[in-house]
Image (cartoon, rainbow, N blue to C red):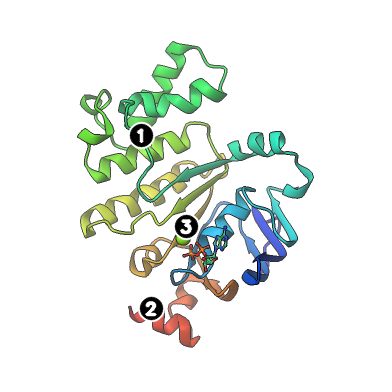
Amino acid sequence: MKFENPAISLQNVTKTFGEHTVLNNLNFDIPKNKITTILGFSGAGKSTLLKHILGVIKPTSGKVIVLGQDLAELDEYQKREFRRNFGMLFQYAALFDSMTTIENVAFPLKEFSKLTLSEISEKSQHLLTAVGLKSESFNKLPSELSGGMRKRVGLARALALSPHIMLYDEPTTGLDPITTKMVNDLIVETAEVNKENGLTTVIISHDVRATLEISDYVAFLDRGRIVEYLPVDQFKKSEHPLVKEFLRL
Ligand SMILES: Nc1ncnc2c1ncn2[C@@H]1O[C@H](COP(=O)(O)OP(=O)(O)O)[C@@H](O)[C@H]1O
Ligand SMILES: [Mg+2]
């Protein structure tokens, strides 16, 4: 699918490690201000694709263009700066274990913003409240929180610098159904609340059921190629044999 002024555009992207082709001449545009999910079996190349979007690894050939910027034109320093456009929520939230909830959220603000300490404190509390955390949790350590609450803290931290693109890597994998629903609701709510500033959501997952409920567009990656890419309602009716197999799981 082609989009006018996409958030992310991969153009003829190939990545090889030695003999092994992991991304195979990908042409893939992700639209702005929508929720797009990339599905695929383990080993399909999903994480490798994500690292290209973040500019952590370079394609062997082809271009990666994010928010109109060709990543190949940035040096390492500029790339790190550019990464502030991204918020990232990892599978296990990846919080700093020795920092409290509020310190985790304040961390990127201390590192990257010019806010005063009291402004940082106020903003961190606001971010945590917005993702549904109560003040009694603000001074707890990650180990004292449930899995669902850790996700909320991770999300608040990812949103601290007002990213234009939120990336979720396996956000619901390994969660119980109730926490899965909570995380899904949180993803949708985050996308809605931040729509005016422009927030593009990209989800990488192999949890079909959870992601189909909330996506606008779904792409299926198989052996480094996008073999299906459709609006969610059409994706559910895909006749592609691999997609059908995947949807049955
Ligand atoms: N740095 C690397 N060096 C060599 N092979 C890699 C490297 N990173 C990933 N691969 C290979 O690329 C393939 C896709 O991996 P990955 O992107 O992690 O898939 P997924 O996230 O869909 O499970 C796998 O076969 C993996 O072994
Ligand atoms: Mg992966």
Q: Which residue type does callout 2 highlight?
A: Leu
Counting residues from the start of the chain, the first of labels 1 and 2 encountered is 1
Residue hosting label 3 = 203
Cα separation, mark 1 vs mark 3, equals: 21 Å
- In the image, residue 66 sits, relative to residue 163, either above or below, namely below
Q: Whole-percent x and y of residue 3? A: 67, 63
Residue occupying image coordinates x 49% and y 41%? 194
> Considering depth in this image, is 22 or 167 the residue closer to the camera?
22
> Considering depth in this image, is 29 or 74 the residue closer to the camera?
74
For the residues labelled 1 and 3, say whether their Cβ atoms are less than 8 Å apart. no
Counting residues from the start of the chain, the first of labels 1 and 3 encountered is 1
Residue hosting label 2 = 247
Residue occupying image coordinates x 46% and y 48%? 191
> Considering depth in this image, is 224 or 123 the residue closer to the camera?
224
Cα separation, mark 1 vs mark 2, equals: 33 Å
- In the image, residue 245 sits, relative to residue 218, either above or below, namely below
Q: Which residue type does callout 3 highlight?
A: Ile
Say which element carries label 3. strand
Q: Whole-percent x and y of residue 183? A: 32, 51
Counting residues from the start of the chain, the first of labels 2 and 3 encountered is 3
The image's mark for residue 130 is 1
